[in-house]
Image: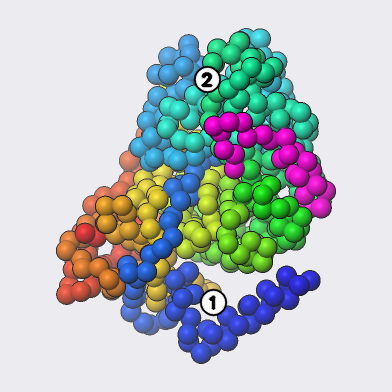
Amino acid sequence: MRGTQTRILIKALALIMMLVGTISSFAALACRSQPGTVNKLVIHADQGRLTISRNIYGHFAEHLGRCIYGGIWVGEDSPIPNTRGIRNDVVEALKNIKVPVLRWPGGCFADEYHWKDGIGPREERPTMINTHWGGVTENNHFGTHEFLDLCKQIGCEPYISGNVGSGTVEELSDWVEYVTFDGISPMADLRRRNGRDEPWKVRYWGIGNENWGCGGNMLPEYYADLYRRYQTYVREYPGNEIYKIACGASGDNYEWTEVLMKKVSRRAMRGLSFHYYTVFEDWSNKGSATEFDEYRWFGTLKTTRRMEDLIAEHASIMDEYDPENRIGLIIDEWGNWFDVEPGTNPGFLFQQNSLRDAMVAAINLNIFHHHCDRVQMANIAQTVNVLQAIILTEGEKMILTPTYHVFDLYKVHQDAIYLPLDLECVDYAYGDEAIPALSASASRDQAGKIHVSVCNLDPNKPAELVCEIRGFKVKSVSGQVLTAPAMNTHNTFDDPEAIRPSVFEAVEVVGDELIATLPAKSVVVLELE
Ligand code: AHR
């Protein structure tokens, strides 16, 4: 009750501040939209103090549809070029965008997965039914060793989600011992018998997934107790520091966050997860990924912008119990969820990916930047062939989606210093609704370069932007832009480069300011030196 009252008070104060026009520090979080005014961005290059964790650029690969099998794992005997069974083209693409962390094996699959079925000689591994995702038979050929090999090939950190829903404490405890213990022990010896002498380093361990739903249909109090118990046996063996992540809420389930924060100590929990998928209007009719009109373009962008308020609200609950921001909000599932492509298995969640997805990715990454004090990791769902995938494959062919290109353009923000900003912009109106037309964020990298990412959400009008950088003398500016002729432009196996970034030239330095013309429906990333 105390928490609710405090939040109401904070909201009332914020409202009063807005009314008297003194919201400059809040304005950094979003565009203050002012119809008819010029678009004006002020970047406070003299105020940066927080780092945008590279882990905000994390990914998620589940045993679901063709994400792992076909998308990542093809087996050592495949004619598709591979290294120890893992596709070379996919690894190269993931390395190129500097994937920092990869979450596996689920998702809902995690709470059905029994890791011991996925070790040892592959032909001897037992099968299981993947009941959540199409009821297909899982042969367990991609298991712990293969996943950790994948992470090594990519050069990213692994994030393993443990099974709380249908697994035991002993099972999870054994997994940590198997993977990370260097001495003589039953699990470390088993690992050695399976061909791996050295332990791996695995810092990120999730204790269950969506345990309010597919991970066991638990109530928050019950899960909080289970979390306390399971995490006790997730041991930190010498040389392997562990960052334990509790299952968090979905959407606006603030009660879940409140209970977890209240019942679990900060020593026992380093991260609390959060899931929010962008679904416009109706889960039973999510719409096509590529066949849509402006109504659905607008609706999707409006829906995705909700991420801002959801993070703010969950973070405000966390602030009450953890004012020093020691517990990270881990947004380990996010992205667009549309209807599956016609003719594909409904359980495989295969959807195409268009310019609209690129906008959604860019808007969310900007939001995560603005909350980088609390958001320590985010993992878009999912890496290959599932939901808002960055890569699609078909046999030996592979294409990069518009979402991939956003991750490529935005990788300059990884581990850079977040720069607060004020943005005043026009509205993008559709029917009798309106949202701010622009979304922006900025950072300074270790070499001192400033990167500014700006999206123009309006599919019909370019936007003139005046940008002032306080505390930084701009000598030169360059940029890249991602846009396309139509809202639904997407890459296909026949036309793999229908949409890709190009050089952005519509920007110049005028005195102490930058003046840019952002094309309609575009994502622009500027580099200032
Ligand atoms: O990403 C697909 C599914 O969405 C995940 O398995 C689950 O955690 C979420 O409901």
Q: CB atoms at circles 2 and 1 under 8 Å apart?
A: no
Picture coordinates of residue 114, whole percent (x, y) = 71, 26
Is residue 382 located in the magenta-colored stretch of the structure?
A: no
Measure the C-alpha gap from mark 2 to mark 1: 62 Å
Picture coordinates of residue 314, whole percent (x, y) = 64, 62
Residue 456 visible to the viewer: no
* Res. 198 mark: 2
Is residue 230 located in the magenta-colored stretch of the structure?
A: yes
| Secondary structure found at label 1 | loop
- The residue located at (61%, 31%) in the rendering is 237
Q: What segment carries the magenta color? A: 220-243
Of the 4 image quadrants, the one containing the C terminus is bottom left
| 440 sits left or right of 472 in the view | right
User: What residue type is disc 1 on?
Assistant: Asp
Residue 158 vertical position relative to residue 193 in the rendered view, above or below: below
* Foreground of the two, 391 or 462: 391
Residue 178 vertical position relative to residue 428 in the rendered view, above or below: above
Picture coordinates of residue 262, whole percent (x, y) = 75, 59
- The residue located at (67%, 53%) in the rendering is 266
